[in-house]
Structure formats: C-alpha cells, structure tokens
Image (cartoon, grey):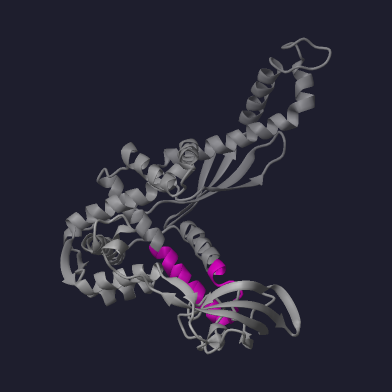
Amino acid sequence: MQVTELKNEGLKREFEITLLADDINKQVEDKVKSVAKTIKMPGFRSGKVPVSLVKKKHGQQILGEVLEHAVAHSSEKVLEERDIYPAMQPKIEVSEFDEGKDLKYNLSVEIYPEVPEVDLGKIKVKKSVVDVTDKETEEGLERLRGAQKDFNPIKGNRKSKKGDVVLIDFEGKVDGVAFEGGAGKDFKLELGSGQFIPGFEDQLIGAKKGDNVTVKVKFPENYGSKDLAGKDAEFNVDVKDVLEAQLPEVNDEFAKKFGMEDLGKLKEAISEQIAKDFENITRTKLKKDIFDSLDKAYAFEVPQSMVEMEIKSINKMSERDSAGEEKSKKEEEKQQKEFKEIAERRVRLGIILADLGRKNAITVNEDELRKSVFEQARNYPGQEQQVIEFYQKNKDALDQLRGPILEEKVVDFVLSKVKAEEEKVTVDDLIKFNEDGE
C-alpha cells in the first residue's frame, strides 16, 4: 500500500491510496481457494471443485468482495496510523482501476477539532428564581375549574356571546363548489376557542337558536391544504342551539374529584405543580445562559460536514412548520444564513459537551438508562412491555436516550464550576421566555 497526503488544511485531510495489483491478486487467489473448499457445483463433490472453474464462474463477485474489504481495511489503517478521528464517515472515491492493475482511490475526511482548555470558573451565568404566589395558585385553580365546566342550553332566547357553545350544521364552498372536510352536523363550537379558521367564530357571535348565518372567511396563506390556502370561502351555518358554560363551585367536594382531602390540599398540589413547571422553565433558561457562555468562551473551527448535516435537519423542520409559505430569494438567503449560524453553534456546543464529558469521566450508567426507558414506556399505557423490548433490541434507539441524559449531567458539572448568580424574575418574564421558544 502506498499513501500520499494530498491535503492538510484546517480540519480537512485527503490522501491518495494505492493498493498494489500483486496484493489484490494474491487476496483474490486466496479467496478463490477458500471458496473452492466449501462451494457446491453439479458434477463435483463438496470441496473438490477446481479452482479454475470457481474463478471463471465467481471471479468477478469475489474480486468485488476483495476490493471492498481491501479499501475498507486500508482506509481504517491509514486513519489509525495517523491518529485521525473522523467527525463524519470518510468519503472514498476510486480514481483508477483495471483488473490486474493497481487500484487508486482518494480518502477525504474531516477530523474532530482540538477543544481548548477553558477556565469554567471565570464564566458567569444568572440563575433565575421565581416565587409561586397566591395569585398564580388561584389562577391555576381557575384554569382547573374552567376545564371542568359543563355547557347547558341557555334560558330564554338571548344572543350568543364569546364563551358560549353553538350547536351547528355547516357546509362550506369555494367558488360555489363544496370541498372535502368543509361540512359537519351537530358540531359543538365554543366561540372564542380558535377551533376554526380566523373570522369564522366571530361571525357567529350574536346569533340565536334557529338562525341561519352566512359566514365569509379567507383561508390563511399557510393553510395545511394547498387547494384551500389563500382562497375565499362561504359557509352556510344553521344554529341549532346555544349553550352557556356552567362552572362548578370551588369547594371541598370539587377537590375530592381530584383525589384531594379538601380544597386546601388541592391548592397545595396546584402550587407544587406550578413550582415544578417554573423550575423546568428556569432550568431551560439557565441552560441557554450556560450554552451562550460556552459558545462565547470556546473558539475553534467546526467540521463543515457536521454543520451541513445539521442544516439539513433544520431545513426539514422548517419545511414541516412552514408548509405552503412562499419566500422571496432574499428571504430564503437570509434564512439559510441564520440556519448556518444555528447549525455551527449546535455542532460546537455538541463537541464542547462531549469533550467536557470525556475529560471529566462523565458517563451514563445502566440505572440511568433503564430509568429513561421506563419513563418512555409510561407514555404508552398498555404497551409498556413492547416499548421496553424495543429499546432492548435497538441500540441506536437506546443511544438516542443516552444523549440527553449525558447533556444534563454535563450541564450540572458546568454549573458546579461556573459562577451562578441568582436573580429574581417575575412570572411574566418566564412566560415570555417560554412563549418566545427560547
């Protein structure tokens, strides 16, 4: 084997590798002899098939297998001898080969970058702290009460208002033609709930039982169905009844519906749940602060092959979330620039976290992995055993659970080293952070 280095720039390495014809021919001959000992052919006893006949009948297949093995083995050896750890699967391109002659191929690879040492003790982050007040608890109780409301026919014949439910039959048409999914009977629609497209529910506010209403709306440009997106539609709606909400009385009996002794215990449970929700949000906020700080503290080149793979993943998510939306060339270019920045940040943070984990012997033990599997299984009542068996049989799926656990453990390690200053924040601050999708 002959190896010539063609490129050594940044994280990119490229080699031209030549596998000598004599070595290839010897491996083919050895393989043919090995096959001849086991192969069965009409007219010959097992193990007695002539080598020449095996070579004539299966020579090309054997040559292909030998070449595949030789390229894989030689490329692994080249990387191993040079202590090269590929960031992604190496790219192999055969540049020259004829049967009986040398085989030349190019091996291109990007390596993992060297991660610099950073004094985590010099990094400062802010740890948000929020108190659960009586106001949040009462609001939580009111939401719980609202979820238990009943709807009963109104007394008299008053007009419908926001918060009422109208029992309707409806049929929609675009350009005078009915469309699939545009009709329904005895449908209960809560006015103001946002169940239907914008403008539909508003036009039924003020309707009475027995009214026939023509509702005119325009489907959003990003509507799920391309046939309807951006189209004007007209619905013929028969209001069959109007129902008003009846909220349950909040007392000890109400609390017992949720397995609580009394109203006081229910409020305690609500307060604890809100505190847990806030804790999850503050943890996410803290992680973002830590990641922002790490991204600024560490400066190194990242493998572009990993960045490209991450961009593809981001694009797939973007296409799914913005189905039907059209962008100008300028908007598309701006978006792709943003996606590249996000991808580079994600790749860099992934490398940093992996490096911190390796250098500080942070690992995921079997108990932690088993606990995560059980948590996944609980999401599928009645199918727990099947879920557990799925993870037991699929290493890749199990490794996907390992990643987030390791990330949390590395974050905890970083948090134990950095300077974390507590800061009081309001509930509104947390809600805004959460709604912004940070």
* Residue pictured at 29% horizontal, 73% vertical: 139
Q: Residue 421 is drawn in which quadrant?
A: bottom left
Residue 68 visible in the current orientation? yes
Q: In which quadrant will I find the N terminus?
A: top right
Instruction: Read off the magenta span.
Output: 319-345
Question: Is residue 38 one of those drawn in magenta?
Answer: no
Query: In the rendered view, does 152 fall on the left or right side of 290?
Result: right
Question: Is residue 336 one of those drawn in magenta?
Answer: yes
How many discs mark residues in the rendered view? 0
Query: In the rendered view, does 170 fall on the left or right side of 158?
Result: right
Q: Is residue 2 above or below residue 168?
A: above
11, 162: nearer the viewer: 162
Residue 34: give x, y in percent of width and height: 66, 19
* Residue pictured at 52% horizontal, 65% vertical: 317
**Outermost residue, right side:** 43
Q: Residue 371 is drawn in which quadrant?
A: top left
What predominant SS class does the magenta segment belong to? helix
**Outermost residue, front side:** 156
Q: Is residue 301 above or below residue 154?
A: above
Residue 357: give x, y in percent of width and height: 29, 48
103, 134: nearer the viewer: 134
Residue 180: give x, y in percent of width and height: 71, 71
Q: Residue 218 is drawn in which quadrant?
A: bottom right
* Residue pictured at 43% horizontal, 55% vertical: 11
Query: In the rendered view, does 231 fall on the left or right side of 205?
Result: right
Query: In the rendered view, does 208 fall on the left or right side of 304?
Result: right
